[in-house]
């Protein structure tokens, strides 16, 4: 009689708990340091940068500039990485970024179906849900339902939803529409309305 058991379904290991993720990260870090590929100082510095310096506030700054400067907006859509460099924003995982702009009739949303590719320089590190298989597969199959059910974003049927699949070569992000009633606002005030979720496309900017 066979005692072989089938392996647990892959889904059983997802989503991993914070503790499981922490343990795996620790194991990987130890291994890379042991192999001489990293030092503790490099790891500490990277963690510090992405915890305190790089995050969606940078993407918000870029969007606010695009809302107030049409020429910059055009350059941003033509070459997002180059336009961000004008503001001193760039770095790893942002070498080839593509910004896609929402309109009255098209709403964009980003995903990485393969893993969790994400434009780090303008958004920081991805939220955990961005890495979950459920988000990655469902966002492609039925984006309208995912936006409505998981994010409370109900878009009219007249708005087409376009889903962009990021990869390690190309990383997409969204330039949301400028909210109505923001005419007199400064670039800095406008940046304060741009949420992380609106840069991913699972939300909209705040309304003043
Ligand atoms: Fe990926």
Image (cartoon, rainbow, N blue to C red):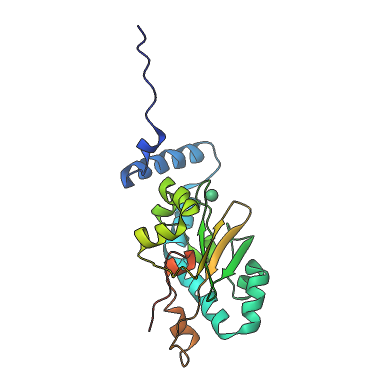
Q: Residue at x 43, y 51 (%)?
A: 135
**Is residue 54 something that shows in the picture?**
no
110 shown above or below 185: above
Residue 113: percent from left, percent from top: 52, 48
**Is residue 8 something that shows in the picture?**
yes
- Quarter that holds the C terminus: bottom left
Residue 136: percent from left, percent from top: 47, 50
Quadrant position of residue 173: bottom right
Residue 155: percent from left, percent from top: 43, 69
142 shown above or below 184: above
- Specify the farthest residue to the bottom: 184
Q: Which of these two is toward me, 132 or 96? A: 132
- Specify the farthest residue to the top: 1
Q: Which of these two is toward me, 204 or 54? A: 204
Tell me if 67 is positioned left or right of 181 in this view. right
Quadrant position of residue 15: top left
53 shown above or below 182: above
Quadrant position of residue 99: bottom right
Q: Residue at x 45, y 42 (%)?
A: 29
Residue 16: percent from left, percent from top: 35, 43
Report the label total.
Answer: 0
Q: Residue at x 42, y 43 (%)?
A: 25
- Quarter that holds the N terminus: top left
């Amino acid at each position: 009689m066979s005692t072989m058991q089938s392996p647990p379904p892959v889904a059983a290991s997802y989503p991993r708990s914070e503790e499981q993720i922490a343990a795996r990260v620790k194991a990987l870090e130890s291994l890379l340091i042991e192999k001489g590929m990293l030092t503790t100082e490099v790891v500490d510095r990277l963690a510090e940068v992405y915890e305190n310096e790089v995050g969606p506030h940078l993407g918000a700054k870029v969007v606010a500039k695009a809302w107030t400067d049409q020429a910059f907006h055009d350059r941003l859509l033509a070459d997002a990485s180059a336009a961000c460099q004008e503001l001193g924003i760039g770095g790893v995982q942002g070498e080839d970024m593509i910004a896609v702009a929402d309109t009255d009739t098209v709403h964009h949303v980003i995903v990485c179906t393969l893993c969790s590719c994400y434009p780090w320089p303008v958004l920081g590190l991805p939220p955990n849900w961005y890495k979950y298989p459920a988000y990655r597969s469902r966002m492609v199959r039925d984006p309208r339902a995912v936006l409505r059910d998981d994010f409370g974003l109900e878009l009219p049927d007249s708005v087409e939803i376009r889903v962009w699949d990021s990869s390690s070569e190309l990383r997409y992000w969204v330039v949301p529409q400028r909210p109505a009633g923001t005419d007199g606002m400064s670039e800095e005030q406008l940046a304060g309305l741009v949420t992380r979720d609106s840069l991913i496309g699972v939300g909209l900017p705040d309304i003043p």
